[in-house]
Image: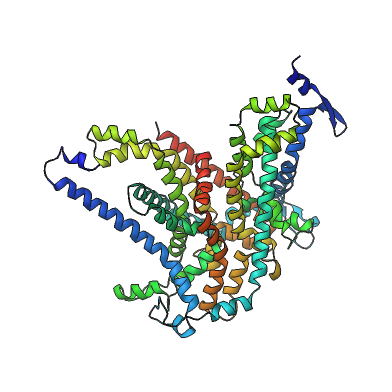
């Protein structure tokens, strides 16, 4: 490919320039990648080395002796499994609710004609940009008033009300030809049958992307769970792991062990579903 | 009358009113989301504005006094508020341009025919799937002045490496670098998708015309990627503007108030001081500022297009 440019300019100089540039690109890309891996390496290394090496002024990236004592201490010091369960429950329930209610209303807004649907659609789209902190204080008083403080529902319900999924589904449903829906209706299909047998199967890729995005997004939330989940037993992993790290006895080894355990679940998900997660995030760019 | 019309005309009732079958179905399918939306998004939004007009009584909320716009007046006169706004602006300035450019550089690099594209993408994007707590805790250790690796290596090239998170000068840049590692993967994948979406024949035509790569970049790549660049800049801006977890975990707003940000100030006012009315006003100000900034961003992006 690069040979074709070589014809017009005499000599080897042009090719050298190209080679140098390519080498530069490789150095920059792989150098950056190496830097990106340093934080992981340091976390692992610190979590696996004995105390005297942790505070050593010379960094020991690969400790001579590996010890799992910090992991044992982290698991003993904090209900990490309980937090993992809480987080998974909250993210899972939010994902299920979002997929069901968002696809239902998107179907209604795009394929069913009813008075007021345009107003409703405009209202939902208008709230697209509302960030959580505007509603933080009034939402907190609401959650307290209806007795949901410390309940997983205090996170699940507000996070199920975000309009992102409605927005995405409306765009995808718009592509389903009306003729298919009308034909089904002529065949005597009810709206519910059209929704479950035609619309949902056609929407599988969009549903998969939105599910993945909602799950990861909810799983990683920090500020709102910090506010409404106040009992240690009710914490999510992101909130809980900070309390382990700032516990009275300062032990970087235990802190990094707990951090690694908190990062592990989603990292495994990322290892398995890398392509899909990247696609789910890129989807925002194309619709935004 | 066609069969379809007959189906449409079928009557049924909802809430005791007679309506067409389609209207009923439409409302029934919309209802579950609308209920969540009204209760947990719309209602708090309206209530928040009302609360921002109250002198909140945290012991007896019903006794709160209506004070019109005094909370907003107080905000303008509150030096702590301005300090938090300043901190937020500094963070935005440190992160937005750097992260957009870094994301663009990585995207253009990976888009070239390099070996290991998938591996590179995997690595650059990986921190994005982590929660802010994990990111913040790891970077606290990397930046630790006494035993952290960063200052060990800096020790070879300088006498006294910075105290990073406890330094007035370097605390905010430390948070910015942490954030770059965490979130630049988003800009990277969005911009990579945009670059890959540019039809190759545009470049082939330019190559036949003898265009050098700088011109191809300026005349083809940049204009073609413009919508994605605008999108990424606005998202980055909104995200940086509401920074909370990094300062909350890594510096608690310190040293002094060097890394205090608006959302942190709002959080402290509401949940440490019980000033719900004032905090609600700050929230509304933030929201208004964000809307204005987004509109200005769109305007600027639109104008320089012409």
- Estimate the x, y position of residue A23 in percent, counting from the top left: 26, 55
Residue B266 shows in the view? no
- Front in this rendered view, residue A198 or A49: A198
B179 w.r.t. A113: above or below: below
Question: Which color scheme did the rendering employ for the protein?
Answer: rainbow
- Front in this rendered view, residue A283 or B58: A283
Left or right: residue A246 versus residue A62 is right
- Front in this rendered view, residue B228 or B8: B8
- Front in this rendered view, residue A91 or A208: A208
Residue A43 shows in the view? yes
- Estimate the x, y position of residue B38 in percent, counting from the top left: 73, 44
The part of the image, by quadrant, that contains residue B171 is: bottom left
Residue sitting farthest toward the bottom: A52
> What residue lies at 72% left-to-right and 27% top-to-bottom?
A185
The part of the image, by quadrant, that contains residue B276 is: bottom right
> What residue lies at 34% left-to-right and 59% top-to-bottom?
A30
Left or right: residue B75 versus residue B83 is right
Q: Quadrant of the N terminus of chain A?
A: top left
Residue sitting farthest toward the top: B1
- Estimate the x, y position of residue A265 in percent, counting from the top left: 57, 63
Residue sitting farthest toward the front: A187
- Estimate the x, y position of residue A126 in percent, counting from the top left: 63, 38
């Amino acid at each position: 490919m690069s040979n074709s440019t070589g014809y017009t300019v005499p000599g080897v100089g042009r090719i050298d320039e190209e080679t140098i540039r390519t080498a530069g690109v490789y150095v920059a890309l792989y150098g950056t990648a190496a830097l990106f891996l340093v934080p992981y390496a340091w976390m692992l290394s610190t979590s696996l080395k004995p105390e005297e090496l942790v505070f050593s002024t010379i960094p020991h990236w690969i400790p001579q002796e590996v010890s799992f004592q910090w992991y044992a201490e982290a698991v003993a010091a904090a209900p990490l499994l309980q937090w993992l369960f809480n987080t998974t429950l909250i993210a899972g329930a939010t994902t299920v609710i979002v997929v069901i209610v968002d696809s239902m209303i998107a179907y209604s807004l795009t394929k069913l004609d009813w008075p007021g649907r345009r107003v409703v659609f405009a209202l939902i789209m208008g709230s697209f940009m509302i960030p959580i902190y505007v509603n933080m204080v009034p939402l907190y008083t609401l959650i307290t008033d209806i007795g949901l403080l410390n309940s997983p529902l205090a996170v699940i319900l507000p996070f199920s009300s975000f309009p992102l999924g409605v927005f995405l589904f409306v765009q995808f449903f718009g592509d389903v030809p009306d003729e298919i829906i009308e034909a089904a209706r002529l065949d005597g299909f009810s709206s519910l049958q059209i929704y479950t047998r035609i619309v949902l199967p056609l929407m599988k890729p969009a549903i998969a992307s939105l599910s993945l995005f909602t799950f990861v997004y909810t799983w990683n939330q920090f500020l709102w769970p910090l506010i409404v989940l106040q009992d240690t037993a009710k914490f999510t992993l992101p909130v809980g792991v900070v309390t382990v790290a700032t516990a009275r006895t300062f032990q970087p080894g235990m802190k990094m062990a707990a951090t690694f355990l908190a990062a592990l679940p989603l990292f495994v998900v990322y290892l398995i579903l890398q392509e899909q997660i990247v696609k789910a995030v890129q989807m925002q760019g194309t619709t935004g | 009358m066609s069969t379809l019309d007959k189906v449409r005309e079928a009557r049924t009732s909802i809430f005791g009113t007679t309506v067409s079958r389609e209207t009923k179905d439409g409302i029934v399918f919309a209802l579950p989301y609308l209920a969540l939306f009204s209760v947990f998004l719309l209602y708090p939004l309206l209530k928040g504005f009302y609360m921002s007009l109250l002198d909140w009584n945290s012991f007896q909320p019903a006794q709160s006094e209506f004070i019109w716009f005094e909370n907003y007046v107080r905000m303008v006169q509150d030096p702590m508020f301005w300090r938090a706004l300043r901190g937020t602006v500094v963070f935005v300035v440190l992160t937005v341009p750097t992260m957009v450019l870094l994301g663009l550089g990585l995207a253009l690099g990976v888009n070239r025919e390099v070996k290991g594209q998938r591996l590179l993408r995997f690595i650059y994007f990986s921190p994005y799937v982590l929660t802010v707590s994990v990111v913040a805790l790891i970077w606290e250790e990397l930046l630790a002045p006494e035993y952290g690796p960063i200052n060990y290596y800096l020790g070879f090239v300088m006498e006294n490496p910075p105290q990073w998170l406890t330094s007035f000068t370097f605390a905010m840049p430390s948070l910015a670098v942490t954030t770059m590692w965490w979130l630049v993967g988003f800009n990277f994948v969005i911009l990579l998708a945009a670059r890959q979406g540019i039809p190759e024949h545009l470049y082939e035509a330019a190559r036949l015309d003898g265009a050098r790569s700088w011109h191809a970049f300026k005349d083809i790549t940049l204009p073609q990627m413009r919508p994605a660049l605008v999108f990424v800049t606005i998202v980055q801006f909104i995200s940086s503007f509401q920074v909370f977890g990094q300062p909350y975990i890594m510096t608690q707003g310190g040293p002094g108030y060097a890394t205090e940000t608006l959302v942190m100030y709002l959080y402290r006012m509401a949940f440490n001081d019980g000033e719900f009315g004032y905090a609600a006003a700050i929230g509304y100000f933030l929201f208004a500022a964000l809307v204005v900034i987004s509109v200005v961003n769109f305007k600027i992006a639109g104008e320089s297009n012409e």
